[in-house]
Image: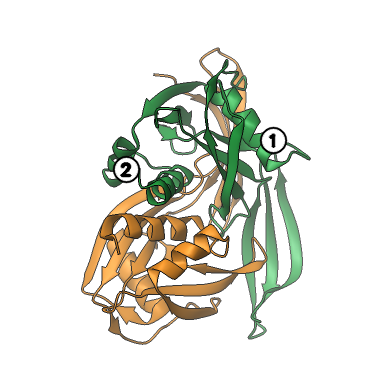
Chain colours: A orange, B green
Amino acid sequence: MINERTIKSDKIYQGKIINLRVDTVELPDKKYSKREIVEHPGGVAILPITKDNKIIMVKQYRKSVEEKLLEIPAGKLEIGEEPKECAKRELLEETGYTSENIEYLFKFYTSPGFSNEVISLFIAKNLEKGEARPDEDEYIEIKEYEIEELLEMIKNGEIKDAKTIIAILYIKNSLNM
Amino acid sequence: MINERTIKSDKIYQGKIINLRVDTVELPDKKYSKREIVEHPGGVAILPITKDNKIIMVKQYRKSVEEKLLEIPAGKLEIGEEPKECAKRELLEETGYTSENIEYLFKFYTSPGFSNEVISLFIAKNLEKGEARPDEDEYIEIKEYEIEELLEMIKNGEIKDAKTIIAILYIKNSLNM
């Protein structure tokens, strides 16, 4: 089993959402290398489907890329929070919808080359209208789309967010909508 | 247009692959908030399909998540490098295959909540066998899979890498293999 033994681990930054550390590792050939690692608490993403088979999407400004992105609802885990509880909470906060039918699909690492961020993906059906309650630093627009529109928006580059692309392609594959 | 005006930008770390900065932004309600941003040079990922419709995958240890992951070939852009050139180079380095038929599909942000990393996805057909030349700190195993096997491995959680999930679901959708 090829592995990387940690020789040294330097904490560079402890932040609000992420931490940064730099590990020195020993490779199988005994040489050393550096690994820059962004620690993230992990999060959830939810694909919300209305009773008439529309997908609820959120649009928000993302400072990291200096543009507004169209995404499925998502958010990071609070300390001690179960992913499914987090999915329920974020669905309500961001879209105003609730669901008694939230099902776990699978999870994935967003960028394992430098981060341990893992997102658990859920699908939420039988949506009921409630009232959105975004975090105080979130400004979110909510929109409904047909799945075929969203597939077209992946192909033409309008949808650019990895977790959102995964959810849309997955549901297209499994439901054959 | 809802936006976030940058009030201050603090460089925290300048690394080998990533940089970290913390921006102070002014929100539409005039309150301030912090944005932790990981700067990444961007990269490419390549879905390599053999003449008999098998997918070439690479398996490597990822220090960030402390496990070996099965992924499509990928790598980061060198300074001034075009994504398509990078795709050709990484395909050869990691798998030993070359292709005269590399086609751009689309690009996506891996984790826009905290990083500007963008990956351009390519598909490589008509593969010709060459010789793999991994970077000196890369230890890579190469394996071939049927697309149906890979789909099953997404559903059961064996494939955990976002860019890889995107590529497999996309090709399943568009080729109807």
**In screen coordinates, is A93 left or right of A11?**
left
Between the C-alphas of marks 2 and 1, the distance is: 29 Å
Residue A22 position in % (x across, y down)? 60, 37
| Residue B23 screen position, x and y as percent | 69, 64
Q: Residue at x 54, y 35 (%)?
A: B124
Indicate the quadrant containing the C terminus of chain B: top left, top right, bottom left or bottom right: top left
- Checking the image for residue B85, the label placed there is 1
Determine if marks 2 and 1 fall on one subunit. yes
| Count of marks, rendered view | 2
Residues marked 2 and 1 touching at CB (< 8 Å) = no
Secondary structure of the residue carrying numbered label 2: helix
Relative vertical location of residue A17 with respect to residue B64 in this rendering, above or below: below
Q: Which mark is residue B163?
A: none
Q: Earlier in the sequence, mark 2 or mark 1?
A: 1
Residue type at mark 2: give it: Leu
Amino acid at circle 1: Glu
Mark 2 is surrounded, within 10 Å at the Cα level, by few (under 14), some (14 to 19) or many (20 or more) other residues, namely some
Q: Is residue B144 visible?
A: yes
Q: Quadrant of the N terminus of chain B?
A: bottom right
x then y, percent, for residue A67: 65, 68
Q: Residue B141 at x, y = what percent?
A: 45, 21
Q: Is residue A11 visible?
A: no
**Could you tell whether B79 is left or right of B64 in the image?**
right
Which of the 4 image quadrants contains residue B79? top right
Q: In this orientation, which residue lies closer to the viewer: B2 or B146?
A: B146
Position of residue B112 relative to residue B61, above or below, is: below
| Along the line of sight, the residue nearer the viewer: A140 or A43 | A140
Say above or below: A90 vs A128.
Answer: above
Residue at the (44%, 54%) spot, across then down: A41
Chain of the residue under the numbered disc 1 shown in the image: B
**Callout 2: chain:** B
Which residue is labeled 2 in the image?
A: B151
